[in-house]
Amino acid sequence: MLPPESARIAQVIAAFSQRAMGAGFGLVITPMFEHLEVFQRVGASTDVVRKEMYVFEDRGGRSMALRPEGTAGVVRAYVQHRPTPPWKVFYVAPNFRYERPQKGRYRQHMQLGVEVLGVDDPAIDVEVISLAHDFFVSVGIPNAELRINSMGDPSTRPAYRAALQAYFRSCIENPSEALAELIESNPLRVLDTKDPALAAVVAHAPALADSLSSESAAHFASVRDGLDRLGIPYRLDPRLVRGFDYYTRTTFEFSSPSLDAAQDAIGGGGRYDGLAEEMGGPPTPGIGFGIGLERVMLASEPEATAPRLHAFIISALDDPWESSTLAATLRTAGIATDRAFGGRSVKAQWKLADRSGAEFAVMLGAQEQARGAVVVKHLATGEQREILTSELVAWILEHRKHTS
Ligand code: HAM
């Protein structure tokens, strides 16, 4: 990802970080590789664990893996450091999955994510979902579609799993070897198959929502109430099964109609109320989401590229440090500034200024310097004027169009 396109990525990451910090989340940075067992916790029967992890032995003979997703490492850190709950954290981090690369699906992808540990209140489910929703709107994806479901709690899961297995065994004749294996190992995953031949079978499968415990049903009803109160549109999707074994109760996914169906998920998440305990910590509810940065870039409207530099300094002076001190002064005042290096001719410096996309060129010349002034040229219109050096900062701050 190279400049100038990468400037949009920086803006999107900044928009996410600001939004997360504005809601009381603190940055967490977990290692890019950890002991294999940490990531195996996301689910022995999931594709990510079985087929997609980058596993290697380190020089000490330990089994390590590159991080395939963000939640396991954050929960591991919680269990290890025991911060006082509620613990609200966010991350911007690369993940690695050995998938078949295609548009929107890469072997290294970035996730913008949040995790909250220690809060059972359905209001946090609503806060987490609304944070993702507001973020999508703010980066130019107002048409993101939100689907939600409840996976129930661990007490009701075995009975549902068995019912689903019985149903699939009875109505899928001659399943392929892979499908037969999936029905036995993880029948819930059959629900989100993309195989059109299975669409009718899946549509009539027993729904998880019908087998929720009364506590899970009440929690889910409250989450829906909260989303309604905040005016966040969503669709109930009883077939929404997310790809990891740790999910309990609320799960959700955002998709973009402007992406190919196989890679249209721009973010997803849910509760994982048993994961901290499974990792050796105290029973601690958890909820979070991960948003795929590359997919956000594909799905969002590319805005007109705004000039990001305010000023480009050109110098005809003999003293090479004049440009450096002026650049430092402007940057300290919050004016994005670049300059030429290497003693280039004034003509070559003007060319660089034009190419830089800066709003103004600031020209240092001997005659102007004698009058305590510089020449400022608006590069788009060609208009230029002399301005007292002592007034330059105030003048640019007043006249620049773009503040970021
Ligand atoms: P996930 O659904 O596997 O969830 O990934 C989250 C998002 O990352 C996806 O919706 C997608 O936008 C993006 N993504 C995933 N794989 C790829 C890929 N190969 N190439 C490009 N983008 C990709 C998780 O990882 C969970 N940890 C989310 C979570 C957090 N649940 C609770 N807390």
Image: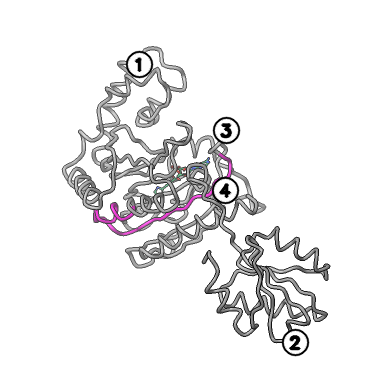
Q: CA distance from mark 3 to mark 1?
A: 28 Å
Q: CA distance from mark 4 to mark 2?
A: 61 Å
Residue receiving disc 4: 66
Mark 2 vs 3, N-terminal side: 3
Mark 2 vs 1, N-terminal side: 1
Callout 4: SS: strand
Residue receiving disc 3: 100
In the rendered structure, which segment of residues is drawn in magenta? 106-128
Comparing labels 3 and 4, the label whose residue is closer to the camera: 3
User: Residue at point 58% right, 74% down?
Assistant: 396
Q: Amino acid at mark 3?
A: Arg
Magenta-colored stretch includes residue 126: yes
Height in image: 193 above or below 151?
above
Label number found at residue 172: 1
Disc 2 to disc 3: CB gap under 8 Å:
no
Residue receiving disc 2: 370
Height in image: 213 above or below 130?
above
Mark 4 vs 2, N-terminal side: 4
Viewer-proximal residue, 209 or 136? Answer: 136
User: Residue at point 68% right, 60% down?
Assistant: 356
Mark 3 vs 1, N-terminal side: 3
Disc 2 to disc 1: CB gap under 8 Å:
no
Q: CA distance from mark 2 to mark 3?
A: 65 Å
Viewer-proximal residue, 69 or 390? Answer: 390
Q: CA distance from mark 2 to mark 1?
A: 89 Å
